[in-house]
Image (spheres, coloured by chain):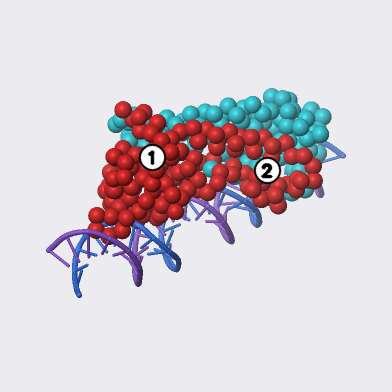
Chain colours: A cyan, B red, C purple, D blue
Amino acid sequence: MKLNQATDYAIRSVLHLSGLPFGQVMEAKLIAEEENIPMRFLLKIMRLLTQAGIVESYRGVNGGYALARNPSEITLLDVVEAIEGPIAINRCLIAPEYCSKKFSEHCPVHEALFKLQQSMVEHLKQYNFQMLRERMK
Amino acid sequence: MKLNQATDYAIRSVLHLSGLPFGQVMEAKLIAEEENIPMRFLLKIMRLLTQAGIVESYRGVNGGYALARNPSEITLLDVVEAIEGPIAINRCLIAPEYCSKKFSEHCPVHEALFKLQQSMVEHLKQYNFQMLRERMK
DNA sequence: TAATACTATACTATTTTTGTCTACATTGAA
DNA sequence: TTCAATGTAGACAAAAATAGTATAGTATTA
């Protein structure tokens, strides 16, 4: 029931980029140093953020990463899902073959966990990076 | 961001016991069969539930497990925490040395994740096993 | 064309999860 | 009293997930 380390790094990286003027490019090496993230690992994480459309990457000299959208348009949920995939607190919620009841009868556990999951999604959706950035001051 | 398999088994086992007349003892072998849980693994899980005061164990002939309290007095949170320990969605929430900000400044990520965690705890606390049992019908 | 910076992907080490096994303690019944 | 049933305790092991590294390659720009 934990976010993994990569997600933590991703959140902090996006938060870092959110502090720059919009569109400004920052290279991975610098982000890694300032946020204390292993450089190679960060590159891997940034690729996921790029694929998810959260950041844009620029190669070559003066390359690096910049936000692809305004911080107010990026939520914690966006970043969490970019790294970990869709939130699923129990495998029975995505893979029916793991539900011990196999739909043979109504499963209240399934129902309760699904509601918890929904509530988590809504919660994570509420926070965008402009908000988070403002709260740093 | 997932509950683990042991927790899933634990929830289903407690739910199963909640369907019996209060105080009735059921042996692990039977629970394992009916809920499709590896027997040895279940024994280990039941030990955690026993230590948490959720079930009572009886050894010897005709031994087994019975609920230690009324199903209405056992919440999903009780069972989740009995197996996984206190909910902590980010290690920075329990181990400050992992917080990249190390309290040197206000960390909005820490704050947002803490609120999410609180919300999850409250959510899990809302469900007791009498409710869950009733919803099976 | 050479240096810089990201991409892609394979590899590895560590940790966590999911079990299993062996030895033992308790209980009840023959 | 002894034996079979049942849980306890903790070591062990296999598999999966996590965290991180390495190697080779691509795009960019000075």
Q: Is residue B58 above or below residue A28?
A: below
Above or below for A59 versus C22: above
Question: Where residue B118 sits: x, y (%)?
Answer: 60, 36
The type of residue carrying mark 1 is Asn
Q: Which mark is residue B43?
A: none
> Is the same chain shared between marks 2 and 1?
no
Q: Residue A82, located in which quarter of the rendered image? A: top right
Q: Nearer the viewer, mark 2 or mark 1?
A: 1
Residue B54 image position (x, y, % from top left): 42, 47
Position of D14 with respect to A8 (left or right) is: left
The disc placed on residue A9 is 2
**Residue B40 seen from this side:** yes
- Quadrant in the picture for the C terminus of chain B: top left
Pick whichever, A101 or C29, lies toward us.
Answer: C29
| Residue A44 position within the rendered picture, expressed as x and y whole percent measured from the top left | 64, 44
Marked residue chain, label 1: B
Location of the N terminus of chain B by quadrant is top right
Q: Amino acid at mark 2?
A: Tyr
Residue lying at 60% horizontally and 29% vertically, measured from the top left:
A123
- The residue that appears at 58% across and 33% down in the rendered structure is B119
Q: Secondary structure at mark 2?
A: helix
Query: What residue sits right under mark 1 in the picture?
Result: B70
Task: Provide residue B135's location: percent of width, then percent of height.
Answer: 36, 28
Counting other residues with Cα less than 10 Å from the Cα at mark 2, is it few (<14), some (14-19), or many (20 or more)? Answer: many
The residue lying at 32 percent from left, 55 percent from top is: B58
Category of crowding for the residue at label 1, using alpha-carbon neighbours closer than 10 angstroms: few (below 14), some (14–19), many (at least 20) = some
Q: Chain of mark 2?
A: A
Q: Residue at x 31, y 45 (%)?
A: B23
